[in-house]
Image (tube, rainbow, N blue to C red):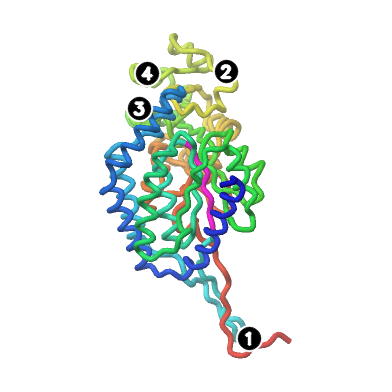
């Protein structure tokens, strides 16, 4: 089928489905989600088989270890996907909820009702679990979804999507609720981004190149799941044992994801005690350290950091390290080089903690905790459709509430405007 017609037909079908989805009750949604959960577990061997095909192809193309990690599925990750669907099913349905009712002097009652956004397109790379998370969240929030994954994950995405679509249709959802663009032609993204008549919101999830391409080409509103240049700042008043534990987790627990630490900032009064120990630990675990001049004077065997290192999302076992003279310098560094994703301070000083929390303008700001918690599941959302580094209309991990809008509803008893 001709590519343009193929994409337009999917968008039209999704729009038609979205009109029906607005009125589907919570019980039916939860039934679909529970069938999706059971289907994933039942078909896990088939999904893993498809994933192995993708992994083999990705290795032959020389994908980085971080990208391979994102692409890889195993029984534990499939179980986590299924558990996410189960959690989403247990969450309160936002659609139809009425809030803020106010009576006007003329007797009118005015309030807001939560409604779905409509049709949401997700353009993403590598991670096939995104297919499951986004389908589950959009279904529960009454939206239809168009999924456009990367060519490197096409077999995995197709296998997962087949299970999810079958479950949704069995529960009574219309064809077009969950849609996967199976074309691996790069032109398909450009065509998709022109479907403003049918698609209400686009969310890109992937590297900087993908996001910039979507933002520049889209005729549809975009919420950016932008890069994660995440910082941990070890203050002069930090508990260094805690700082050590947090820093190791933030970098090593899963270095190829957007909430991993990419830059470690250390106050000058803690640097001599902290840096030799933490750098040894990280290097013993395969991390390449790129440090400022002060860092390299404290720990000799460290590569010099270049200017562009401070603004690089490595998604790999590489870490930039900088010694700062004050809390102000740390905050200034984050403001200049950060991506407004997730940043943390480790300190026992209340005033410094509150100063950092107030002044660091990121979607998620942590006190004495790892940045790795920036995740829909960890925030109690069951899953997430993305992590917004924008400020409108959503910020941080996006769950059910963030996939809705509202409309004003007005109750009267014959009022007319004079």
The kind of secondary structure element at disc 4 is loop
Residue 306 got which mark?
Answer: 2
Q: Is residue 416 left or right of residue 97?
A: right
Quarter that holds the C terminus? bottom right
Q: Main secondary structure of the magenta part?
A: strand
Q: What residue is shown with label 1?
A: 106
User: Residue 194 placed where, x, y %?
Assistant: 65, 49
Distance between the Cα atoms at labels 3 and 1?
63 Å
Residue range highlighted in magenta:
119-125
Taking depth in this image into account, of 312 and 152 the one nearest to the observer is 152
State which tag comes first along the sequence, 1 or 4.
1
- Mark 1 and 2 residues: CB-CB less than 8 Å, in contact? no
Q: Nearer the viewer, mark 1 or mark 4?
A: 4
Q: In the depicted view, which residue is nearer to us: 232 or 73?
A: 73
- According to the picture, the residue beneath numbered tag 3 turns out to be 244
Q: Secondary structure at mark 1?
A: loop
Label 1 to label 4: alpha-carbon separation: 70 Å
Q: Residue at x 41, y 64 (%)?
A: 173
Does residue 106 sit above or below 132 in this rendering? below
Q: CA distance from mark 2 to mark 4?
A: 20 Å
Dot placed on the residue nearer the N-terminal end, 2 or 4:
4
- Which of label 2 and label 4 is nearer to you? 4
- Give the answer, above or below, for where 253 lies relative to 377: above
């Amino acid at each position: 089928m001709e590519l343009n017609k193929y994409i337009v037909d999917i968008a039209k079908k999704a729009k038609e489905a979205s009109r029906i989805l607005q009125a589907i009750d919570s019980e039916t949604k939860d039934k679909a989600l529970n069938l999706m959960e059971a289907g994933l577990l039942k078909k896990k061997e088939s999904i893993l088989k498809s994933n192995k095909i993708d992994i083999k192809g990705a290795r032959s193309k020389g994908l980085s270890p971080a990208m391979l990690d994102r692409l890889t599925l195993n029984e534990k990750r499939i179980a986590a996907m299924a558990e996410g669907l189960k959690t989403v099913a247990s969450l309160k349905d936002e659609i139809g909820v009425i809030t803020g009712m106010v009576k006007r002097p003329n007797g009118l009652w005015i309030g807001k009702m939560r409604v779905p956004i409509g049709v949401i397109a997700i353009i993403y790379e590598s991670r096939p679990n995104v297919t499951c998370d986004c389908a589950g969240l959009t279904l529960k929030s009454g939206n239809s979804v168009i999924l456009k994954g990367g060519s490197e994950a096409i077999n995995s995405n197709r296998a997962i999507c087949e299970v999810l679509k079958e479950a949704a249709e069995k529960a009574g959802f219309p064809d077009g609720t969950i849609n996967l663009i199976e074309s691996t032609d790069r032109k398909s993204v450009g065509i998709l981004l022109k479907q403003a008549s049918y698609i209400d919101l686009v969310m890109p999830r992937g590297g900087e190149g993908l996001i910039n391409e979507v933002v520049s080409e889209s005729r549809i509103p975009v919420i950016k799941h932008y890069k994660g240049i995440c910082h941990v700042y070890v203050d002069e008043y930090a508990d260094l044992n805690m700082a050590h534990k947090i820093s190791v987790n933030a970098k090593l627990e899963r270095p190829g994801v957007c909430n991993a630490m990419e830059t470690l900032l250390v106050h000058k009064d803690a640097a001599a005690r902290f840096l030799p120990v933490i750098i040894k630990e990280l290097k013993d675990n395969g991390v390449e350290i790129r440090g400022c001049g002060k860092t390299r004077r404290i720990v000799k065997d460290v590569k010099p950091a270049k200017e562009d290192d401070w603004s690089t999302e490595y998604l790999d076992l590489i870490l930039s390290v900088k010694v700062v003279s004050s809390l102000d310098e740390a905050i200034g560094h984050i403001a200049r080089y950060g991506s407004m994703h997730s940043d943390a301070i480790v300190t026992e000083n209340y005033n410094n903690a509150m100063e950092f929390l107030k002044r660091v303008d990121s979607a998620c700001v942590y006190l004495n905790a790892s940045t790795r918690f920036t995740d829909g599941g960890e925030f109690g959302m069951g899953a997430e459709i993305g992590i917004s580094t924008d400020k409108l209309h959503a910020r941080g991990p996006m769950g059910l509430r963030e996939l809705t809008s509202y409309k004003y509803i007005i109750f009267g008893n014959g009022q007319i405007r004079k």
